[in-house]
Amino acid sequence: MLLNQEIVKIKNLQLAARLVSEQVALGMHRSRRTGVGVEFEQYRHYVAGDDPKRIDWKLFARTGKHQIKESTSESQLTVTMLLDLSGSMNYAESEVTRLQIAKILLASLGYMAYIQNDNVQLGVIQNGEISLLVPAGKQAFRNVLYQLENLKAGEKLELGNINKGVLATKQKELIVVVSDLFSDDLDFANEIKSWAMPGKEIIVLQLLGQKELDPDFKEMHRFRDLETGKELELSAGNIREKYKVSFQNYLSEIEKVLTDKHIHYSRFTFDTPVAEILTQTLSKIKWSF
């Protein structure tokens, strides 16, 4: 399995996405397992007004249930990918930035959706707004790659003017958020939770550096806020353990907020291969590939 330090060196994002997707497909076929019960079925229950000819009688013989096999238009999934573009996404460890990993994650996911004939669209979250850069369409995947290759992180996340209209599709929708989830008072996690509803499944992938989880502070250490640029110098001995406790408490609070039957939250470090992140995530929601 390709390491992240290797995959980010591939300059062609489509090639990187294809290589990762092939590894994901292999991993999912090897370790097919029952997930948490979330999947977009190809069948729905028969209701008055449906043509009885559409009932799958073979399935009825096995289950005793009247099920209608959905048409392509009924079963097609919209995969909405949302990328956090706040300044903290530029954080790097071992010469790999959070943003680089996020871009390859979304490019790979978009590629998998594309070859399954699902709709794919790309949005970004920055300065309190969700901007839909690539709406679903025939050329969407190619445009997703172009946008991802050129996106840069900066400014603050903020959440004052979130436009939920971007998420107002009537089709079945899989919303995938890639972020560090750093925000004041759990604002971002609470915002994500407000999107959850029947017909919309949400995957939240939180990317963290190992040194963010367990910093190796030595003597005096200078902290710099990647979103505001402010710096603060503190004695390592006074803050290391306090920082770890405080940060773990913050992560626990995020997990509590994002505990919902329509939300699937996972946390990964930079050294987790992108293919492994996607394999674990997609296996949980039973998204076949």
Image (cartoon, helix red, strand yellow):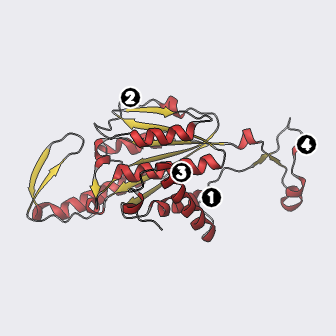
Label 3 vs label 1: CA separation?
Answer: 14 Å
Mark earlier in primary sequence (3, 4): 4
Inspect the image, locate mark 2, and give the three-letter code of the amino acid beneath it: Asn
Disc nearer the start of the sequence (4/2): 4
Among numbered discs 2 and 3, the one appearing first in the sequence: 3
Label 1 to label 2: alpha-carbon separation: 34 Å
Can I make out residue 28 in this image?
A: yes
Disc 3 from disc 4: Cα separation: 37 Å
Residue 271 placement (x, y as % from top left): 37, 64
Amino acid at dot 3:
Leu
Pick whichever of labels 3 and 1 is earlier in the sequence.
Answer: 3
Q: Say which residue label 1 marks.
A: 286
User: Does the residue at mark 4 contact the one at mark 1 (Cβ under 8 Å)?
Assistant: no
Is residue 180 visible to the viewer in this orientation of the structure?
Answer: no
Q: Amino acid at mark 1?
A: Lys
Mark 3–mark 1 contact, CB under 8 Å? no
Residues at badges 4 and 2 in contact (C-beta under 8 Å)? Answer: no
User: Would residue 209 appear left or right of 177 to someone viewing this image?
Assistant: left
Horizontal arrangement in the rendering, residue 252 relative to residue 65 (left or right): left
> Toward which corner of the image does residue 10 lie, by quadrant?
bottom left
Whole-number angstrom distance, CA of label 4 to CA of label 1:
29 Å
* Distance (Cα) linking label 2 and label 3: 27 Å
Question: Which one is in front in this view, the residue at disc 3 or the one at disc 4?
Answer: 3
Q: Which residue is mark 2?
A: 161
Where is residue 49, by image quadrant? top right
**Mark on residue 18?**
none
Residue bearing the label numbered 3: 109
